[in-house]
């Protein structure tokens, strides 16, 4: 399904609004993960508002597409997408990380409508995605499974066990998206654990690979369609992104992986995003 210019502009505006809302939420709560949430904004928005087959009125529909946010610390951006897509009231976002809230620090499938897998411990989402994809084959279903990975996360060995298994099973309905922002908790990926080309590594494991500008709605929509058309095996999309995208003093800096937002930072961030103070 090709994306129109009007739809692209609509989703770009939605992303800018969600970035402002994210800063508001994390400043108010003084907790959360701004850097990785900002970097995967366009990826999640394109999936939830254009690509995926989902029904907020029936979040557990057996035929729905599945999404696993394996980099579960980016939950605030996931919650923004789910709320604006209609899975729960937008007003509920104000309960983020509060006692008894359905919006916990990491996604919880038992509590939050629209969350397909509880995540947090890194490296486990792709394995679950392989299982979900294989379940579709065994039950004669035609849904797709999307797994959003972090580039620090793929240092986990379980990711590569899952990659081998997906190739063996030829899970043509499994699409992994690498949020390739080059920065993780304690520094750059090159500083912590140089990995070379993730795409080449997945290719060596038998995956089809594609690349995308992870902040271009138009590019992402087109690449998702290419990935869906490739049914002979699993697909990795290497989405090139910027950690902290949209807030200049956060961009590319590991300190903003999970740092609380001060009053001064809040003012500067809202100015950068075009929001009222």
Image (cartoon, helix red, strand yellow):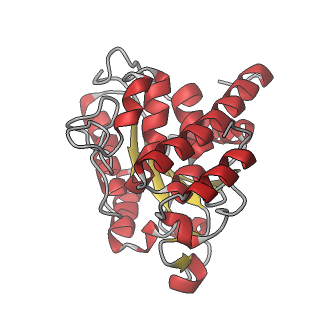
Instruction: Say above or below: 42 vs 240.
Output: above
For this rendering, which residue is in front, 169 or 30? Answer: 30
Q: Residue furthest right?
A: 5
Instruction: Say above or below: 5 vs 189.
Output: above
One can see residue 174 in this view: no
Write the residue at 60% across / 62% down.
180
Q: On the image, which quarter does residue 103 sit in?
A: top left
For this rendering, which residue is in front, 48 or 202? Answer: 48
Write the residue at 37% across / 25% down.
64
Write the residue at 63% across / 33% down.
17
Write the residue at 34% across / 54% down.
125
Q: Position of residue 24 (x, y in %)?
A: 53, 42
The quadrant of the picture occupied by the N terminus is top right
Q: Is residue 135 left or right of residue 254?
A: left
Q: On the image, which quarter does residue 216 sit in?
A: top right
Q: Position of residue 94 (x, y in %)?
A: 40, 34
For this rendering, which residue is in front, 150 or 96? Answer: 96
Instruction: Say above or below: 129 vs 153.
Output: above
Q: Is residue 176 left or right of residue 166?
A: right
For this rendering, which residue is in front, 180 or 164? Answer: 180
One can see residue 86 in this view: yes
Q: Position of residue 165 (x, y in %)?
A: 34, 60
């Amino acid at each position: 399904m090709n994306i129109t210019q009007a739809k692209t502009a609509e989703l770009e505006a939605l992303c800018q609004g969600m970035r402002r809302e994210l800063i508001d939420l994390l400043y108010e709560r003084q907790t959360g993960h701004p850097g990785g949430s900002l970097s995967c904004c366009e990826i999640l928005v394109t999936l939830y508002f254009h690509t995926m087959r989902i029904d907020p009125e029936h979040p557990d529909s057996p035929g729905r597409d599945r999404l696993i946010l394996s980099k579960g610390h980016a939950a605030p951006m996931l919650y923004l997408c789910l709320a604006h897509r209609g899975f729960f009231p937008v007003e509920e976002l104000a309960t983020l990380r509060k006692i008894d809230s359905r919006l916990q620090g990491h996604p919880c499938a038992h509590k939050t409508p629209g969350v397909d897998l509880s995540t947090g411990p890194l490296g486990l989402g792709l394995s679950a995605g392989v299982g979900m994809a294989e379940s579709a084959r065994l039950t004669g279903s035609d849904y797709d499974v999307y797994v959003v990975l972090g580039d620090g996360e793929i240092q986990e060995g379980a990711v590569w066990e899952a990659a081998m298994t997906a190739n063996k099973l030829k899970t043509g309905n499994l699409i992994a998206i690498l949020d390739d922002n080059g920065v993780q908790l304690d520094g750059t990926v090159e500083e912590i654990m140089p990995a070379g080309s993730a795409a080449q590594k997945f290719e060596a494991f038998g995956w089809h690979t594609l690349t995308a500008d992870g902040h271009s709605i138009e590019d992402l929509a087109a690449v998702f369609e290419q990935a869906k058309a490739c049914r002979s095996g699993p697909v990795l999309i290497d989405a090139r992104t910027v950690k902290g995208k949209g807030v200049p003093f956060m961009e590319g800096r590991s300190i903003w992986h999970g740092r609380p937002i001060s009053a001064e930072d809040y003012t500067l961030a809202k100015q950068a995003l075009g929001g009222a103070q």
